[in-house]
Amino acid sequence: MSPRVVVAPRDSDDTLAALDVARRLRVPVTARGAGTSVAGNAVGTGMVLDFSRYMDRIIALDPDARTAVVQPGVVMSSLQAAAAAHGLRFGPDPSTQNRATLGGMIGNNACGPHALAYGRTADNVVSLDVVDGVGRRFNAGAGTLDPVAGLDVLVRANLATIRTTLGRFGRQVSGYSLEHLLPENGRDLAKMLVGTEGTLVTVLQATVNLVPAPAAPVVVALGYPDMPAAADVVPALLAHRPLAIEGMDARLVDVVRRHRGAGAVPQLPAGGGWLLVEVGAEAGESVNDVLARARALAADAGTDAVRVVPAGAEATALWRIRADGAGLGGQTPSGAPAWPGWEDAAVPPDRLGDYLRDFTALMADRGVDGLLYGHFGDGCVHVRLDLPLETPAGIGPSRAFLEASADLVASYGGSLSGEHGDGRARSELLTRMYTPEVIGLFGQVKALFDPENALNPGIVVDPRPLDADLRRPSARPTSALRGFAFAEDGGDFTTAVHRCTGVGKCRADNSGAGGFMCPSYQATRDEKDVTRGRARVLQELTNGSLVTAWDSPAVLESLDLCLSCKACSTDCPTGTDMARYKSEVLHRAYTGKIRPRNHYTLGQLPRWSSLVTKVPALARLANTVLRIRPIARSVLTAGGMDPRRQMVTFAEERFSAWFRKHGRAAMHDSAVPAAGSASSSPPRPVVLWADTFSDTLDPAGARATASVLQEAGYTVIVPEEYACCGLTWISTGQLDGAKKRLAHLLSVLAPYAADGIPIVGVEPSCTAVLRSDMVDLLPDDPRAPIVAASTHTLAELLTAPAPLGPGPSWTPPSLAGVEVVAQPHCHHHSVMGWEADAALLARAGASVTRLAGCCGLAGNFGMEAGHYDTSVAVAENALLPALRNAGPGTVYLADGFSCRTQADQLAGRQGVHLAELLAPDNYGSTAAA
């Protein structure tokens, strides 16, 4: 379903005006925070109010009163950061807090792991400035129900029903929480409105309570045979007053290991399921007191598989496993897509173990799989399920499973939703949880606030059928067209783009966690420029609803500001690879057609640079002419590039030519290792692959790589025949041309790889092609995986154990006292990882400031006409401020040609390749090592 209009109000007045227009035109309204809801709570067919773009201010924060006044678009982590300066925090903290907004949390009554200690969002709201469905603006708080005529009478007439049916346990979030309106609960209208999913009021502003932040909480990791066994002990652990009790399935941890690497998962005690229990200091307690309480809790945990982890990096890493569950659960361990729909059911904690046994039995009986995790201390279970929604034939079995699940949770006195709301996914099932009397009462409340059913219709009251608005079943399979194979997605582009399930991690500022996505969104803050927004457009393309053609303006516009940085392929928990999708779309959109000019210039840059540098005199002439700015601007403009950019400088001596003249002799001389500096073992062969950028544009890194490899005891081989990986053809969607170049490259490199000789790449983006894109572009070529497995970065080779690595007899030159600002290339971060580089620099003793995020040039992107301003804005996220703050002696380390070019053109700073930094004659000293 698609809205008629999306409005991004700048303030309350804008919101009121938009609501007035909607009422007059009888257009329904859906309020939207970050749009990370997973139950279809924030989609509608009329007007969507997006508060996340502008109405994101913390209006006031009173540390003495421990309150904050916020607009609905404030991201939760922003409030947490502001409160932390005063030793405070907002209690509830969903795992999506770095992109979830307060408005969305109020809409769903969000909780998170620490709701066990601090309560739900409803328990932390003081008052709400709201507008109801008939345009009445009022301040909702405790003590009176007068703002809504007839509400007090309705509550008094239904006291028995409300007292016996609603608010029976903490996570009973489904429906309307009318228990807050009872006299004994303070007649709190604000708390009741929390969790009503925008169906009763639109929130303009909220006043919330803050709580003291716990000091140095301790994590107790407890192992059990399975998840139900872990759930059985929760009641005993609650007696110890923990801050959080989280459950994790062993299969979820396995997925984290596969996604992030084994090093991303700290040691866990033995088990098939775990509880992570957090214990914090209470009044007057010391760190030792907290540790003692943690050990006492462990003694009552019914298991010997125990680890007590004090506050620190390891405890943070444990919590990150749980936080990533919302995205990593988007696929089953077998790789099948897993969907929200039965996302967060909850039962009273003392019944959780038995519920899990019955629920997993139901899953097995219906052939449904999913990764279980959740807030076990509150009885809340998260799971995404591989419901057969790829075709319309799967809708019936999916509906039957959800109905059976609703009956099961109701039989345990539970709630369909424990924190995510009912939305379009579950509202129809409320009749299986509540009696007709309660359902009727919800309808009467709705009529008092919104008699015209204008606010988020189809949810909670008079709900749409849960299978009425499903997008995935109507998406058609996409047959191959000589592009990417999409092997991990069954060969289907449609399945690939539906990896994105809207968790929205791409909207967050991930730089603090070392993440890189999504650079264009960080610059523009426009939803169309975020990975999720682009994925949504491509999903619409595959179902043929809003978009029907590969070359439609909507598709091309959505992809235009994608930098093809590939960060989403790693940073997104679902593995959404927008760079690959963009390349495939451009391939399909322009096959057999005239392409944009920059596809022929930048997209085929290796062809032109190879021709120009084949004759050194021609390269010198080109450089001389292109240094004349009027000529350079004309060439840039004619080639579809931004005239504010500078032309590349062509190498007047290619690396391959230099190696034939000078390098071979040096390599021959190195057959006898230099005492004290190189390995005492016989020299081992290594292929140094110089890509186009390293051979024809900036050979310094390749030369230094050859030197460092020689010092490390290798015999360096540079193939006689030049071989391009086709990177620029890939980034511009010229996949037929890319495949031709990759096939030639394989003919050059595969014989070495087959003989067990490692291959070292110089340019990260080209090395990443060999490790990633090549295998999917040439899935039937048996040489591709062999070359991919043999290809390494310089740091990977130098830090590898023998016999691949140089062994302990080689040490890097000392970089003690050298200050380094390091810009990992995006493809390096995403495909190879930068951990080996970090380890090598640490071993050398360098002081490194590691930047997160793209430099903004990103190959052809920042050179193209229309991208300059975005390119500069992306550079301002991290790179340019870091270079401005760096001292004059600080080394700017950037293996990527684009990263060095961006810094040179925008900041006048010359960057160096890792090999240049490690070359003893430049910065280091082998004697000092």
Image (spheres, rainbow, N blue to C red):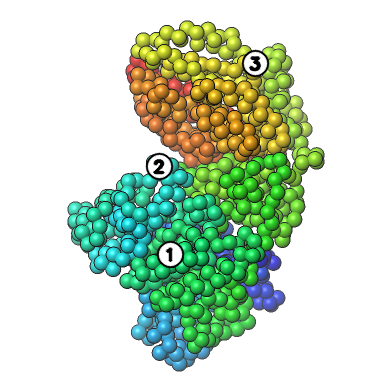
- Residue ID at (35%, 56%): 273
The quadrant the N terminus occupies is bottom right
Q: Which numbered disc covers residue 262?
A: 2
Name which quarter of the figure residue 474 lies in: bottom right
User: Is the C-beta separation of discs 2 and 1 under 8 Å?
Assistant: no
Is label 1 or label 3 in front? 1
CA distance separating discs 2 and 1 = 28 Å
2 vs 1, front mark? 1
Along the viewing direction, whichever of 263 and 388 lies nearer the viewer: 388
Can residue 127 be seen here? The reply is: no
Which comes before the other along the chain, label 3 or label 2? 2
In the depicted structure, whether residue 899 falls above or below residue 320: above
Mark closer to the chain start, 1 or 3: 1
Determine the CA span between mark 3 and mark 2.
Answer: 45 Å
- Provide the secondary structure element on which disc 1 rests: helix
The residue indicated by pointer 3 is: 652
- Identify residue type, mark 2: Ala
**Above-or-below relation of 313 to 625:** below
Residue 45 seen in this snapshot: yes
Q: In this image, 156 relative to 777: left or right?
A: left
Sequence-wise, the earlier of marks 2 and 1 is: 2
Tell me the residue that label 1 is attached to: 360
Where's residue 813, x and y in %? Answer: 39, 20
The residue sitting at the front extreme is: 365
Q: Residue at x 76, y 30 (%)?
A: 634
Of the 4 image quadrants, the one containing the C terminus is top left
Q: Amino acid at mark 3?
A: Glu
Tell me the crowding category of disc 2: few under 14, some 14 to 19, or many 20 or more residues within 10 angstroms, Cα based. Answer: few
